[in-house]
Amino acid sequence: MKPDTDRQALIDETVARYRKILEEMLPDDNATLDQIEGAIEDIGKNMLPDLQEKVVNERSKKCRDNKIDCTCGGKARFRGMVTRTLITLHGLLRWTRPAYHCKKCGKGCAPLDASLGLDKGDTTLGVRDMVAFFVPDTGFVGTTESLRKSRGLDLSASTVERIAVSVGAQLRKAQETDAALHKADQLPDRRTACPRRLYIGADGVMAPMRDEWKKNGSLGKLNCRFGECKTGIVYETYVDKQTGRDSRVSTRSYVATTKDVEAFEPLLGLLAHRAGHHAAKEIVLLGDGAIWIWYMFARLFPGAIQILDFYHACDHIALVAEAMFGKGTDAGKKWQNERQAELKDNGVSLVIAAITAWMPSTDAGQEIKRTQAKYFTENAERMRYKTYLEKGYHIGSGVIESSCKHIVVQRLDQAGMHWRQAIADAILALRANKRCTNPVDLKPYLAMAA
């Protein structure tokens, strides 16, 4: 193979230049570790951007044509060397290359951009990948500070937001497409290992939203409100060797959206599919008393084990005890403890009997009696807690409740925040994916975030 003399010349020139830099900046034997660390960092900052620019611009030194074919069918003529500035992981890159213009369609082009895999954006895929990594945790402003501190990059918060929202929106679009295929039974099984026991939970949590609005007031006054973000988790657990019961979470995957249950349901179904629920030996569904959760579970996972969170059930017992005996009374606490013990011993029928035996003297008391008796009656099959514990199951929905907090609340519900639904949904897609044990690779969506 014939050696590339231009490439070799570039290597020789670079080596000579950086030998001089190393001689000037490399620490001596008396330097502390902090001094060595700082010096090596400075050497990299001096060497890498310049080397990158030389390597990239070497492409433009090749022979060029005065005319090239245009996509419109005409001929594009060479107009000169045009410099384009890009933000890369090593700082600003000035890429000078031949530019062409077609009179027939009136469009310009720079064919060598394609040789570098560039799109119309002013950031590289590596920069966008870092933005999509930081934003779910640190926010838009925090990401600009993180990139400035860690990489010396100067991106505005609006640029960071634009990139992150675009990546998140494309990720969500792909999820919705796969979810539709799964619902139609057209999504291939990934042949995952058969889970011993797969837990699936769902819940909703409120986050601050706002309607469409512009600072100039052209769309009217700012209208802030709260909207529900639905969150789902699919997880497996370790088994406690002493008790034989399920203990800590071993693998987890999440989904969260600002959209309604009709949009959330197929996304949760897709999440379960990717976790191998079709091959799972057991599926355990956990939730509170929200009726939309159980209707959704019944549609998605018919025949699965349904467990109503024990601690939510205890809250309902406490509500009745307070109405019967007053808040904080010894009699109320005694009645409450007795009912909780019955509930945990598969005695939901005893709890119902105790509630129906109550004869409240007020309309408010009558309503509490009616609604709580109905609650325990309708959920009785989901309250066989002794049986569940004997089988080693989790009986609390703490995992899904904590998921709502760290996927949604800790990112969306901070001081002064209010979100447009589309932006919040894109960020939730990124954050939920990042928190998964095996997150989806974002590379296919970076090129779309120009």
Image (cartoon, rainbow, N blue to C red):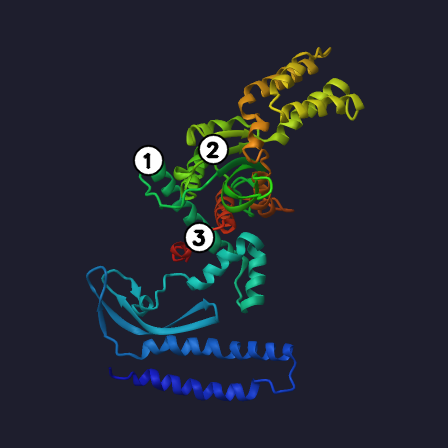
Compared with 346, 425 (above or below) is: below
Q: Tell me the distance, in whole angstroms, between the alpha carbons under discs 3 and 1.
A: 26 Å
Q: Amino acid at mark 3?
A: Val
Decide which of tag 1 and tag 2 comes sooner along the chain: 1
**x, y percent for residue 236:** 50, 43
Q: Is residue 189 left or right of residue 320?
A: left
Residue 397 visible in the shown view: yes
Seen at 51% across and 48% down, the residue is 427
**x, y percent for residue 27:** 60, 85
> Quarter-wise, where is residue 244 in the image?
top right
Which circle marks residue 167 in the picture? 3
Q: Is residue 243 left or right of residue 295?
A: right
Q: Tell me the distance, in whole angstroms, between the alpha carbons under discs 1 and 2.
A: 18 Å
Local SS, label 1: loop
Q: Decide: marks 3, 1 in contact (CB < 8 A)?
A: no
Q: Tell me the distance, in whole angstroms, between the alpha carbons under discs 3 and 2.
A: 23 Å
Residue projecting furthest to the front: 242
Q: Amino acid at mark 1?
A: Ala
The residue singled out by tag 1 in the image is 184
Residue projecting furthest to the left: 73
The residue singled out by tag 2 in the image is 261
Q: How many marks?
A: 3
Seen at 52% across and 86% down, the residue is 21
